[in-house]
Structures are given as C-alpha cells and as structure tokens.
Image: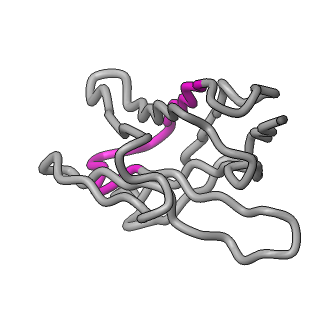
Amino acid sequence: QVQLVESGGGLVQAGGSLRLSCAASGSIRTINSMGWYRQAPGKQRELVAQIISGGSTNYADSVKGRSTISRDNAKKTVYLQMNSLKLEDTAIYYCNVQCWTVVGPGDYWGQGTQVTVSS
C-alpha cells in the first residue's frame, strides 16, 4: 500500500555531511509524521529526527544542532541533512512514515540505507 524509497547514504569522513531522502508513494491519504531512525550494530533502533504534520520537529540529543529534518509535502518526501558527522553516527538509517491510507492508519518503514563515517 505504501512504499518508501530511501537514498543518500554512503561513506563519509568524520566532519563531513550527508543528506538522506525518503520518498513515499502509494495509497496515502494523510501523512501524520515522517522521520528517520537508525540502528547501529549491537544496538537498538533509535529515533534520529521526526517531523509532524504541523511542522514541529523532534531530534535525538545526539544529533541536535548538527541535523535538520525537512519535508516536501507535495512530493511526500522527507529529508535529513546531517552535518559534522561523527564516527558514532555510523548506522543503518531507516525512514518511517505514519499515515492514513485508503484502508486505515499505518506505520511504514523503508528498507534502510547505510551511513558509514570514517576517521
């Protein structure tokens, strides 16, 4: 019903920047929130940043001040700009969309994109 296509991951040196993108498509009626989570090896998945339908945002303390989440409502796309990347930002980043579809509410995940920060 809902497909999420992520892009923008890769290998970057510490101190560098990356922009992740996630485009949603399918039978979406209303998007409640769009966000990014990450999971590092041996750790639980954690929220990185989230943007709610009204435009308010939430950030993990670990990325606050270094990252900006934004969305293009017309394109149903969410972006995560990450600057001053640190080694500990290395993880698989997953896009998450909470929305209403033609059959009801849903919570959808992308396939994940690897972000590796090297020294």
Residue toward you, 65 or 99: 65
> Residue at point 60% right, 41% down?
3
Instruction: Give yes or no for residue 29 being in the magenta stretch.
Output: yes
> Residue at point 16% right, 46% down?
55
Residue extending farthest to the left is: 54
Residue toward you, 68 or 103: 68
Can residue 101 be seen here? The reply is no
The residue segment tinted magenta is: 17-34
> Residue at point 30% right, 46% down?
29
- Name above or below for residue 113 compared with residue 57: above
Please identify the quadrant where the C terminus is shown.
Answer: top right
x then y, percent, for residue 47: 51, 65
- Name above or below for residue 77 compared with residue 116: above
x then y, percent, for residue 23: 51, 30
x then y, percent, for residue 111: 75, 47
> Residue at point 67% right, 50% down?
89
Give the main secondary structure of the magenta stretch: strand
Q: Is residue 1 left or right of residue 13?
A: left
Instruction: Give yes or no for residue 48 being in the magenta stretch.
Output: no
